[in-house]
Amino acid sequence: MDELDINHTRRDLLIAGALSATAAAVPSVAAAQATGTTRNETPRPPVTSKVALIVNGKQRELNVDTRTTLLDALRENLHLTGTKKGCDQGQCGACTVIVDGRRINSCLTLAVMHNGAEVTTIEGLGTPDKLHPMQAAFVKHDGYQCGYCTPGQICSAVSVLDEIRKGIPSHVTGDLTTAPLLTEAEIRERMSGNICRCGAYSNIVDAIVEVSGRKA
Ligand code: FES
Ligand code: FES
């Protein structure tokens, strides 16, 4: 290849690179369609919907953007900030609340999917003057350090004991024909969706065992 060919090739590459960079910087028609807008058009207002929840025993009526998660509805609309946002994608358990008797990650579900549901958050379990037994046990056993994961841990722990009482098996339950035992392995497995970056795990297990009234 002579010098002219090499320069030609370099120039072609530079032009091709500039063109692809420009293309990436300009929003595509498809992207505009995805957001429901075209150039010079104002964005459409969000679609809203009414949703009625019974939160910590109180009837609450909301009018929310249909994309609002239950977590955001609790924190931003109802100002119940005890429920925490950690990852906002179902990985940490900080947002755990109890809905119709079952614990769920409130960041992974939309508020409008729970019309008529009963929701219990950490604020509904106990008060500073009258702690829920699980809250008192977490204090007694130092089941937290920074406390960020704690509301989710406590909501999960309350549900874990309920699940074991009801005989619901977990991944580590050996014999599926009999009720699961309250072993440390069962508790750790069932609490494994609640991450504590402070590492208070062994104290959390101690607190749960105490509330269960059984020896792990
Ligand atoms: S905030 Fe919901 S699981 Fe992390
Ligand atoms: S107490 Fe800090 S993250 Fe659990």
Image (tube, grey):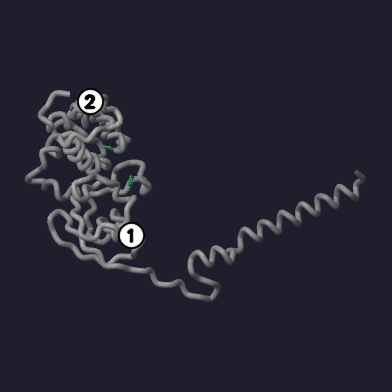
User: Picture coordinates of residue 143 (x, y %)?
Assistant: 20, 33
Q: Return the residue nearer the eye: 69 or 20.
A: 69
Q: Secondary structure at mark 2?
A: helix
- Image check: 11 left or right of 118? right
- Image check: 99 left or right of 19? left
Rendered-image quadrant of the C terminus: top left
Q: Residue furthest front?
A: 177
Q: Secondary structure at mark 1?
A: loop
Name above or below for residue 103 compared with residue 199: below
Mark 1: is the Cβ under 8 angstroms from ligand 1?
no
Dot 2 surroundings within 10 Å: few (below 14), some, or many (20 or more)?
Answer: some
Q: Which residue is mark 2?
A: 184
Q: Residue furthest left?
A: 130
Q: Which residue is mark 1?
A: 68
User: Picture coordinates of residue 7 (x, y %)?
Assistant: 85, 50
Residue at screen point 29% across, 53% down: 71
The Cα atoms of the two marked residues, 1 and 2, are separated by: 37 Å
Write down the quadrant of residue 199 in the picture. top left
Amino acid type shown at disc 2: Glu
Residue at screen point 23% across, 58% down: 79
Name above or below for residue 210 compared with residue 73: above
Q: Return the residue nearer the eye: 194 or 5.
A: 194
Rendered-image quadrant of the N terminus: top right
Mark 2: is the Cβ under 8 angstroms from ligand 2?
no
Name above or below for residue 23 compared with residue 100: below
Assign ligand 2 to one image quadrant: top left
Dot 1 surroundings within 10 Å: few (below 14), some, or many (20 or more)?
Answer: some
Q: Residue furthest right?
A: 2
